[in-house]
Image (cartoon, helix red, strand yellow):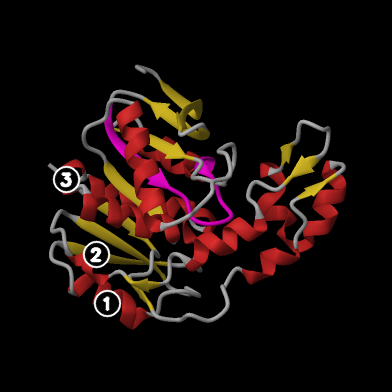
Amino acid sequence: MSGTSVTGIRGELSIDGRRLSYLDFGGPGRPLLALHGHLYEGRTWTHLARALAPRWRLIAPDQRGHGDSDRAASYTRDDYVADAIAVLDHLGIERAVTLGHSGGGITAFQIAARHPERVPAIVNVEGPVCDLDDGPSALSFVLSLPYTAPDRQTLLNAIGPLAPLLGDNLRPTPDGGWRLPFHPQDTITSEQQTHGDHWPDWTSTTCPALFVQARNSQVITPEEARQIATRRPNTRLIELAGDHFAHTTNPEAFATAVKTFLNTLT
């Protein structure tokens, strides 16, 4: 792919009969694999892709069970890492900076931990490194949402306050109905797999890394952010105005922070 696409070119690959869809924004630049968190999908990175072009070619999968990618039988951390490597292999990319938000941020540094030769740098956006809370999922509210509805408006009405976030991402179904871009129960299963102690993975590599902390984060405290930055060598910390989703609610500042970091890479 030689030209840059402002919306990304949709591609897909098959993994054991399961479709994994992705957006490739193209261009001649260095590859950057961008991994969304729960409730989101690949096109959440469209603004970042435009801001980084043409120096960076952003590839954004719809991770398993999200967007145009098929639901999966399991949602373990190793599953997500394997999917990411499969996308890179499919595109013939040997090395790529990995960037991710929340659960996608965990995947970004776990790819580096398991395949250090393939990751020259990491951008972790609010991806927890240590979460020992085994209580109810922070996303348990999605269980009250219907996965499908007979028409788009009915589904919009049913998701209520989430309509501004999800409305543009609803999908038609083969039977003429509409569905969410994720399955509620799959989301809970996946989110619970992000819990635990990820310090060994985070600190196992020393490539340049950026940790993005949101000033009003609901997930990462300022002290945790400082520990994440100081306990891993070669790691920078930046604080942005906004909450856990600052990459979408404060996109200009986020893109500037990422671009500034990437410009330091050799």
Within-10-Å neighbours for mark 1: few <14, some 14–19, many 20+: some
Q: Quadrant of residue 257?
A: bottom left
40 in the magenta segment: yes
Q: Amino acid at mark 2?
A: Trp
The residue depicted at 56 percent of the width and 73 percent of the height is: 137
Disc on the earlier residue, 3 or 1: 1
Task: For mark 3, give the secondary structure.
Answer: loop
The residue depicted at 33 percent of the width and 53 percent of the height is: 108
The residue depicted at 22 percent of the width and 52 percent of the height is: 114
Can residue 156 be spotted in the picture?
yes
Of badges 2 and 3, the one in the foreground is 2
Quarter of the picture holding the C terminus: top left
Classify residue 188 as left or right of residue 5.
Answer: right
Q: Position of residue 229 (x, y in %)?
A: 23, 70
Within-10-Å neighbours for mark 3: few <14, some 14–19, many 20+: few
Q: Amino acid at mark 3?
A: Leu
Q: Which mark is residue 226?
A: 1
Q: Amino acid at mark 1?
A: Arg
The residue identified by callout 2 is 202
Classify residue 81 as left or right of residue 164.
Answer: left
Within-10-Å neighbours for mark 2: few <14, some 14–19, many 20+: many
Disc on the earlier residue, 2 or 3: 2
Residue 215 position (above or below residue 247): below
Task: For mark 2, give the secondary structure.
Answer: helix
Task: For mark 1, give the secondary structure.
Answer: helix
The residue identified by callout 3 is 265
C-alpha gap between disc 3 and disc 1:
22 Å
Q: Position of residue 35 (x, y in %)?
A: 42, 48
Span highlighted in magenta in the image: 29-43
